[in-house]
Image (cartoon, rainbow, N blue to C red):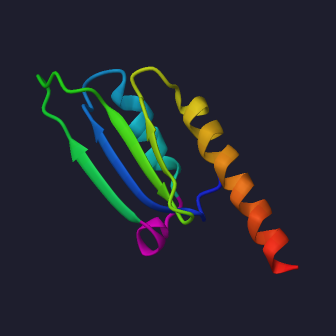
Amino acid sequence: MITKHITEVTTKFNPFKRPGMTCRVFLAHLPANARQNMKINTEVLPRNSKEKSGLKLKFKDGKEMQLDTEKLSIKDVEEEVDRHSRALNRQTELSAN
């Protein structure tokens, strides 16, 4: 997963329910130095909470991505993040020349 263009990660999940797994795995896939390069906000919901899990990402170009982790698997989330990150990689390569 390409994370160098992410500036902020906000997660909200219930660790006791299945949909919270996508958020937990996404946070685990972030590099060890992620806190130095991006702002990470995590809200852990109580066991009996009815709120939905969610993942919100902000990129260097200002784009905000709101992902519904109730419906998306970790592969789907990584695919969406990589798609936008590859586009940003192309932009930086083209502007460098």
Say whether residue 43 is magenta: no
Q: Name the residue: 75% across, 70% down.
A: 92
In this picture, which residue range is highlighted in magenta? Answer: 31-38
* Viewer-proximal residue among 4 and 65: 65
- The answer to whether 73 is drawn above or below residue 90 in the figure is above
Image quadrant of residue 49?
A: top left
Q: Which residue, as the protein is rendered here, is positioned at the far right?
A: 97
- The answer to whether 33 is drawn above or below residue 87 in the figure is below
- The answer to whether 93 is drawn above or below residue 18 in the figure is below
Tell me where residue 91 appears, x and y as whole percent. Answer: 76, 64
Q: Name the residue: 73% across, 53% down.
A: 86
Q: Give the quadrant of the C terminus.
A: bottom right
* Viewer-proximal residue among 52 and 65: 65
Count of marks placed on residues:
0
Tell me where residue 70 appears, x and y as whole percent. Answer: 39, 22
Q: Which residue, as the protein is rendered here, is positioned at the far bottom?
A: 97
Q: In screen coordinates, is 74 left or right of 90?
A: left
Q: Name the residue: 29% across, 56% down.
A: 41
Image quadrant of residue 2?
A: bottom right
Q: In screen coordinates, is 95 left or right of 56?
A: right
Q: Name the residue: 40% across, 45% down.
A: 56
